[in-house]
Every structure is written in structure tokens, then in C-alpha cells.
Image: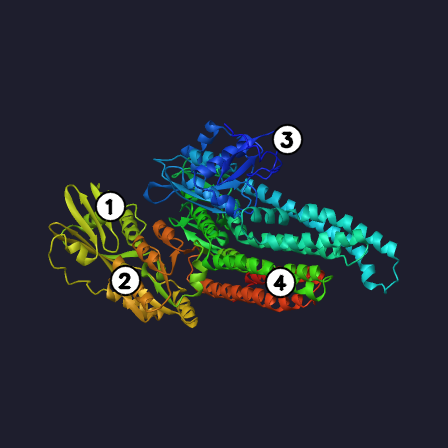
Amino acid sequence: MSAAAPPALPGAATDCFHCGLPIPGGTAFGFESGGRWRAFCCTGCEAVSRAISGGGLDDYYRLREASAPRPVPDREDAEELRLYDEPALQQRFAREVGGGEREASLLVDGMRCTACAWLVEQVAERVPGVVSAKTHFASHRALVRWDPSRAKLADVLAAIRSYGYAAWPFEPGRLAALESRERRAMLRRLWVAGLGMMQVMMYAVPGYIAASGEIALDQQRLMDWAALVLTLPVLAYSASPFFAGAWRSLRNRSLGMDVPVALGIASAFVASAAATWRGSGAVYFDSIAMFVFLLTGGRYLEHLARSRAGEGLRRLERFVPKVAHRLDGAGLDGTTVPAALLAAGDRVLVRTGEALPADGVLEADEARLDEALLTGESRAVRRRRGEPVLAGAVNAGDAFAMRVERVGAGTTLANIGRLMERALAERPRWVEMAERASGVFVAGVLLAALAAALAWITIDPARAPWIAISVLIVTCPCALSLAAPAAATVAVGEMARFGFVASRGHAIEALAGATDVVFDKTGTLTAGRPRLLEVLAFDRTREEALAIAAAMGRGSSHPLDRALAEAQADASGALPALESHETHPGHGAEARIAGRRYRIGQAAFAGALHGKPAPVAWLHAADTVAWLAGEEGWIAAFRIGDRVRPEAAEAVAALRALGLEVHLLTGDEPGVASRVAAELGIGRVQARATPGDKQEYVRRLQREGRRVAMMGDGVNDAPVLGAADVSIAMGEGADLAQLRADAVLASGSLADLSRALRLARRTRRILRENLAWALAYNAVVLPLAFAGMVTPLLAGIGMASSSLLVVANALRLRMRGD
């Protein structure tokens, strides 16, 4: 039940504390919190505010820059929300992650500022069973991970909606409609400001060019009144976001970026209106209208710049076809079905010019695919029978059949999208530092304006208001607040264009400062498609040994296990059943078959099962050797070879040319590691490295003051990826490695690593240029404004131009070249 307002307070509040809308007359919704009375327009706003306060989330009201959305009756009841928990529907937008957890991208409507994004995170994470929630205010996204055994997605959606935010599983169509609505609103404000500015300038220009006394006093007063009237809609509509943001900042006892802007606009208008009323004194309605127009235009351009990174994400989501031609039998006859209904094992026909609807395996002898969307490579690539093909690739050759393996949220394309989304949701350190600095700077601007007013009152009282207004406007730190976010956001989107997906907010910053690059070998410097070259059987036949080895690696994504599985498939034999199986990252695997224990992997690991010395043969082979042993002794050894990637030598040379030290860190034998290092020109090598050895190697470099970038692709690389300053996983690598990595090389080309590093350094350079410009601009214009040499008109032009310059400089990252 709502509490009635105390006698001294009724009527004191006219706007709803929660949503900011006017409170209808005769209503008395509210409660007291922290010694202050909170009045609301309806029971819904009161209920949400009570929930926020009761949950210990009152920081939302202190930090927000815009009013919360007003709660409305939910159009989808609980039963309809439960449909999103259906496995068949959930596979379109959710995926399995480590430990049986699931992850989904949600579209959240109603987030109006970063505090709203924070509140949505807190609300989602407080649902029992939710592991994490990350929101990105600019893209209206929330990336939620939950434990299906403890939570339902419908519960998460219902919790978010109970706070007034409309939430659904992400769909590109809904996001496009939401962004279109926002863009139209911004353009309308810009149009009104531009039209008002032109009309006001029409009355102001004669006063600038006419000689003294040439315009009659009554005519000048008429033009001043006309300019005042024409400026009103500019202030009431186009400038309303600045006033609303400033009021909320002050009400929540903080100094947001809108405070000096709104104060400068309001002060200039009040002073000009007073001069118009008196019929004497200077008026600056043209300056006000132009300032609002330029600032609105700057924020619109900022909005476009912030959405640059989202363009790549939206392209990924839109490119997968909505329908597929599912084949019914062994031939090429079938039916057209929604792509969401495909399942693993289905056969699909992909016609010329069509995009692949799912990840799978090619069943035709050969296919030509355009994978530019995934890798940034514009030339079509050839795939052969049995090779993987990915959703989003376009058939650039003849029609072919493929067998589906992963659909919906499980595809490589969807995983790239999630990684980009995670990067956008996280805030790099340099962005946070710039935002903190801009907050302090706002207080400095207000103090400088006050000091200017006090100083000029003693010098020339008539000029004091205008000089204070000029100081307030010209030094507004908008450029400072844009410097870091604009550069970081554009860089994320630009890297994604050529297949380097930054999945953590700090990835670009850390990559720019890297001094050493440490490579894993298999699947990273080598192609990751090893082939079984030879089998040396000791205790069983070749076929029996190969069947045991293939059974122990069944389902694994490790390149060596795939090589054994492919060789066994060619030999066509039945695999023995596993009674138990355990993986030992960096060493091998152990299994129990028909009551007997077996080990496969490194010689020391496999030999520990029986304690007998290893055969001399192949101990120092230049290729990788996998040893198979049982409790009774050695069973077989498998010599497996892999080719070095064709671009690896050039990529290593490019990294060294950039001043980086290159290392090779592998669990393979010294002979294999030395051969690859010599071929690529890598001087620092460590072989037979366990996951713990790899971590210690990286930490030793870090203790020496080095900044380490680690690149790997296997499950055994996950620990060392987490230890590096910046970690990079190969796009075709294991899922765990990608989850732990700060970036993913989706293109699969090592040449793009040096390209990304050069772009990261350019981003750092442009960020520094932006910050230097913002600080230098204020250092120069503040004394000029303080001395009375900058009019409010020039102040508005200068401040808006400074912000636009910062955004334009960040957009230079989109220019091709290094």
C-alpha cells in the first residue's frame, strides 16, 4: 500500500521521482527514503522504486543521466515468456558454454543512460542461477549467462521487465526498429535546431553588418523579439535532452557533461531575453541557436561513430538466411524449411549465390566459398569433401550439399557475434580514465566561469555575464569525454572487418602495448590439420592400436586427436567402447576399455602407467609423436606431421619488424619445436612445456617488465591465455580457448595479427591525439575567454567544433592502411 505524503510535503514534487513524468493532480503515491520524500505518478513507478531501494540499488538514482522508463503492463504474460525456455526455440539465440551453462543475447528496450545498463545488469544477476550479465547501452544488448538447472530464461526476462525495461531474446529486426526510432528522434531535433538557427541568423546578420545608427531602434527591437520567439522551440525541443540531463545530474548530486552546457544555454537565453525586454544591451539568440544546432549535430555524429562497431555485428546477424533447402534423402530433392528448424545431421542444398544456413561438413567433391563476412578475405576459398564449412559463407561456385553440424547460436558466426558483443559491453581502462577526468573537469569549468564573473564584475559589470557564459560554453569538456570512447569503438568495428575480433574491452589497449608475442605451435603456427604419417605397433596390430587411440580421442577438437580419428575412419573399423575417460591438458588422455587402463600422449605420461622404458625409436623425431600404452606395457607410437602455415614466416617477420620479440612455446618434443622455429626464424623456444610451464614462462617475462601477447588454439592453452597481458585464440580453435581469450583471430590468417597490432597502435596514437587536442584546446581558449576575447557565438562554434574534430579524428581509423 502506498504511503501518504507528510503534511508539509504534498504538492512539493511535480515530476515523478522514477520516470520524470508529471504527477497527475490528486494522486499521493510515494514513500520516504534517506530522509527524502519520493513522489510517483503511479503505483507501478512506486513499486519499481521500492524494489530498487529494497535491493540496495539506490546508486542507480545517483548515477543515472536520464529518467527511467515508466512501467507498463506486460503484453507477454508468463506463459508466453515460458516459450523462450523451449529447447527448439532456444537454439536460435542461446548456446551451451562451459560447465553446462547457457548464454544468450537479449535486446533491452528502455535503457536511456549507462545507469540504466548498470541497473539491468544488477537485476539480471540477482536472479538465482544467473552467472553473469553484461550490458552495452549503445547497442541495447545484454549478454546473460545462466545455469539451466537453477534458472530459466523466462525468469530473467520477467525480472528485467518488472523494472520497466522491455526485454526479449535478441532479433536483428527489433534492434533495427529501435535504432531507427532513436535516429529519427535525433534527426528531428537536429532539423528543428537547424531551421531555428537559420531563421534567427536572418534577424541577427543585419545588426552585424549595418553601421552604427543605420537600423532604427524600433526595427532592432522587433528583430530581437522575433529572434527570441524563434529561439524558443530550439530550446524547448532540440535542447531538451541537455536540460533534462543537467537537471537529473544536479538532482542526483553529480556533475554530468550536460550541466555546463545547459547552464550556458540557459544563462545566455535569460540574459538575452532580459536585454530584449529592457530594449538595451547585447543579445545572443543567434549564438544560442547555433550552439544548440552544432552540439546536437555533434552528438548525432557521436551516435553514428558509436554504432560503427555495431555495424559489423549487425552484418553478421543479418547475413544468415532465414530459410534452407533441406534434403530428404541421398539425392538433391527436398523441401524449403525455416533455417531455425535445422538440426545436426540434416543434409542441406546450398545453391549458387546463397549463404550457408549452418555450420557443417562439405559433401561435394569441391566448393568455392566467399568467407569475407567471417574472415575479411575477399577472395573465394576452395573447400574439399569432408572439410568444415561455416554459416554466413556465400557459395561462389556450383550448388553443393552439406551435412549440418551446428545451427543457430552454436555456429561460428554466432560465436564471433557474441565475442564482439562482449567487447562492446566491457569498458577499457582508458575510457574509464577519460570519463573520470571529464567529471572532474566539469567542476573546474563551473569554478572558472564563476571566477570570470566575479573578476569582471569589478572591471566591467555589463560584460561580466557574457564573459562568464563564454567561459562556461567554450571550455565544456565534451571533446574530452568523447576522446577515448570514439577511438575505442571505431577500432573494435574496424578490426572485425578483417577478421580480428576483440572480445574484451582492454584487448586493444593491451595489444598496443605488447612487447613480446608468444605462439603455441599446433593449430597456430602450423595449419592445425596434421596427418598420421606412420604407426609403429609394439604389442597389438596396427588396426587395433589405431582403433584404441581413435576411441580415446573421439569427440575431441585437438588436431592430433582429429588426425588419429581421420586415419581410423579411412581404415574403417569399429571403435571400442570407453568405460571412462579423463583428459590431462598438456600431457594426454587416460581411458578404461574392457576393464583395462590406457594412456595416450607424451612418452613420460603414457609410460608412467607401466613404468617401462620407452623404445628408442622416434624419441627425437622431427614430427610429433603420440605414445599409446597399457598397464602391461607399450602398445604403439603414432608419428603425426603438420605443415607450417604458408603465411607464418611472413607474419613472424612482420612482428619482428614492429619491434616485438617472438617466442615459440609448445608441449611437443624438442626436435619438432626446433624444426618449426628454424623454418620461421624464431629464436626463443621452449619445448615439452606443460600448461603450468607455459604459465610460468609468461609470468617470467612479465616479471622482467615485458607485456606479453599469447596466441594459441587448444584446450591446453586456456590457462596460459588467462595469464597473458592480452590473449588471442585462433578462430578455428577450441571453444574454451576462445572463451578465455581477449581476442579471436577469426580470419585464421596470421598476417592479420600484425595488421591488428598496427591498428591498435594507431588507436592508441589517435586516442593520445584526441586527449592532447582536448586539453590543449581548453588551455588556449580558457585564457582568451577569461580575457573577454571570445563571444558566446565563437564559444559555441569552438566547443562544438572541438567535439566534432575528436570524432572525425577517431573515424580516421576506418581509413585503409597502417
User: Is residue 652 something that shows in the picture?
Assistant: yes
Q: Position of residue 205 (x, y in %)?
A: 80, 59
Give the distance between the C-alpha atoms of the residues marked 3 and 1, in whole angstroms.
76 Å
Is residue 813 placed above or below 175 in the rendered structure? below
SS at circle 4: helix
Which mark is drawn over residue 519? none
Q: CA distance from mark 2 to mark 4?
A: 57 Å
Whether residue 116 is visible here, answered yes or no, is no
Precedes in sequence: disc 1 or disc 4:
4
Residue 451 - label: 4
Q: Nearer the viewer, residue 158 or 761?
A: 158
SS class, disc 3: loop
**Above or below for 94 versus 453:** above
Ranked by sequence position, the earlier of labels 1 and 2 is: 1
Q: Circle 4: is it few (<14), some (14-19), or many (20+) Cα within 10 Å?
A: some
Give the SS element for disc 1: helix
Q: CA distance from mark 1 to mark 2?
A: 33 Å
Assign a secondary structure to mark 2: helix
* Residue at image point 31% right, 52% down: 715
Say whether residue 621 is left or right of residue 501. left
Q: Which residue is mark 2?
A: 696
Task: Kindly identify which residue carries mark 3.
Answer: 25
Callouts 2 and 3 close, C-beta under 8 Å: no
The x, y position of residue 392, in whole percent, is 48, 47
Q: Which residue is mark 1?
A: 551
Q: CA distance from mark 3 to mark 4?
A: 43 Å
Identify which amino acid the numbered label 1 is placed on. Answer: Ala
Instruction: Indicate the amino acid at tag 2.
Output: Glu
Q: Nearer the viewer, mark 2 or mark 4?
A: 4
Residue nearest the observer in this picture, 228 or 644: 228
Return the residue nearer the eye: 557 or 547. 557
State if disc 4 and disc 2 touch (CB < 8 Å): no
